[in-house]
């Protein structure tokens, strides 16, 4: 689904799975990551059109991750 990819970064796997299921039902391709560094790697690999991320990730803050992604875009 070109143009409809979302990167979802959330360390709460059950919540991430629930959000992912809803987004997939709405026609999006969803790539999940559960830590900040993993999210950054998947961002580089997939270049999604949107990112949904949790503020408090186990290895970095969501704000720091957003800043790093912005610098790469």
Image (cartoon, helix red, strand yellow):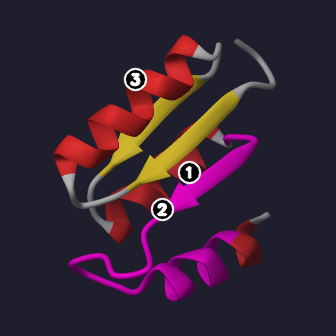
> Which residue is found at the position 61% from the left and 76% from the top?
66
> Which residue is found at the position 54% from the left and 44% from the top?
7
Instruction: Please report the bounds of the magenta region as a residue range.
Output: 48-69
What is the C-alpha distance between the residues marked 3 and 1?
Answer: 20 Å
Q: Which residue is mark 3?
A: 21
Q: What element does badge 3 sit on? A: helix
Q: Is 27 located above or below residue 4 in the figure?
A: above
Tell me whether circle 1 and circle 2 mark residues in contact (CB < 8 Å): yes
**Is 15 left or right of 46, judged from the image as shown?**
left
Residue 19 counted in the magenta span: no
Q: Which residue is mark 1?
A: 43
**Is 66 left or right of 15, judged from the image as shown?**
right
Q: What element does badge 2 sit on? A: helix
What is the C-alpha distance between the residues marked 3 and 2?
Answer: 22 Å
**Is 73 left or right of 66, judged from the image as shown?**
right
Viewer-side residue, 69 vs 20: 20
**Is 32 left or right of 52, judged from the image as shown?**
left
* Res. 48 image quadrant: top right
> Which residue is found at the position 21% from the left and 57% from the top?
12
Viewer-side residue, 22 vs 3: 22
Q: What is the x, y in percent for residue 8? A: 47, 47
């Amino acid at each position: 689904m070109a143009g409809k990819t979302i990167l979802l970064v959330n360390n709460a796997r059950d919540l991430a799975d629930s959000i992912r299921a809803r987004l997939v039902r709405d026609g999006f391709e969803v790539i999940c990551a559960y830590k900040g560094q993993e999210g950054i790697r998947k961002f580089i690999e997939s270049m999604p059109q949107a990112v949904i991320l949790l503020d408090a990730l186990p290895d970095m803050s969501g704000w720091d991750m957003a800043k790093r992604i912005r610098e790469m875009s």
